[in-house]
Amino acid sequence: MSTILEIRNLKKSYDDGFEALKGVNLSIEQGEIIALLGPNGAGKTTLISVVCGIATPTSGTVTVGGHDIGTDFRATRSMIGLVPQEVALEPFERVISTVRFSRGLFGKRSDEALIENILKRLSLWDKRNNQIKELSGGMKRRVLIAKALAHEPRVLFLDEPTAGVDVELRKDMWDIVADLKADGVTIILTTHYIEEAEAIADRIGVIAKGEILLVEDKDALMQRMGKKELEVQLSAPLDALPASLKSDALRLGPDGSCLIYTYDTRAERTGITNLLSDVAAEGLVLRDVVTRQSSLEDIFVTLVKEDAA
Ligand SMILES: Nc1ncnc2c1ncn2[C@@H]1O[C@H](COP(=O)(O)OP(=O)(O)OP(=O)(O)O)[C@@H](O)[C@H]1O
């Protein structure tokens, strides 16, 4: 894989002196989907704005496809598509005209077959002659994506693509993103929906207070930081953990009705067999056994909390 976007020691201070990015380094590979997670005000939109040429960096370098965003702005901007967080569309314009116009803005020759293809893919073809004001909120979001794709970008930024959309449309958006990836488009999305990152991203970047705390392959991250819990539900509640069962990995559940055992799935021995035989030796009767895997959300909350500490 080759690097399509390279961000080196990027800093951005706003006019009031606020340092929104404090030396961000990030390399993005061609064709991957990376999700940037971070609390409100972390600097996600600022980062996207700098790469897209909407905000000027204070220092550092950004290259897109080997071109510098400062010295080679036209080349980098034409390689990038941006789906902004806010819906900003002209209400009286027709769907197809606004998408055609976006292509024209980049000086690309008109290509009706391409526009038709984009609109069909986004299920907007039937609405192509409707005015924007006649569309639902979800359709308007699709129009924003169509506009961002009209000049055939190689890198697509989606800033909170599914904020406030219903579950069905969110799933549709995920399918659209998967299709784009299959076409070789690199996708960088910011999201507050951690299940969205869990569902579609190849890599996860966590950003807080203008710094990247971590960038890692999603599956590796979940393996590394994810813990598993085994809940052993008891027929009769206990007042305290029996001495023979005392261990750092085991605790008694809130009302004494279960034992909660934390273990690492990658360890050679999880200790589950020993635990269950110790439980049997203690004469405890089991009602049920449940396992739980920590989610990306648990991992994210832990990371951001550690950073704030
Ligand atoms: N034009 C500006 N002037 C001064 N400060 C700004 C400006 N734009 C953003 N900021 C500040 O920079 C910080 C980062 O904002 P940014 O919009 O990049 O965060 P974000 O991670 O996208 O947040 P959210 O998840 O809420 O969209 C915030 O503290 C914000 O108040």
Image: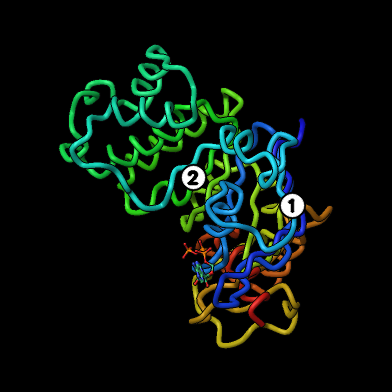
The colour style of the image is: rainbow
User: What's the residue at 61%, 87% (across, down)?
Assistant: 240
Residue at horizontal 57%, vertical 64%? 43
Identify the residue position indicated by label 2 in the image. 158
Q: x and y percent of residue 280 in the render?
A: 67, 67
Q: Is residue 258 visible?
A: yes
Is 300 left or right of 176, judged from the image as shown?
A: right
| Residue 89, quarter of picture | top left
Between residue 25 and residue 304, name the one nearer to us. Answer: 25
Q: Which residue sits furthest left?
A: 134
Return the disc, 2 or 1, that comes first in the chain's sequence: 1
**Can the viewer see residue 292?**
no
Q: Secondary structure at mark 2?
A: strand
Report the front residue among 268 and 1. 1
Up/down of 119 relative to 57, above or below: above
Q: Is residue 173 above or below residue 248?
A: above
The residue type indicated by label 1 comes to Thr
Residue under numbered circle 1: 61
The residue at 20%/24% (across/down) is 129
Tag 2: residue type? Leu
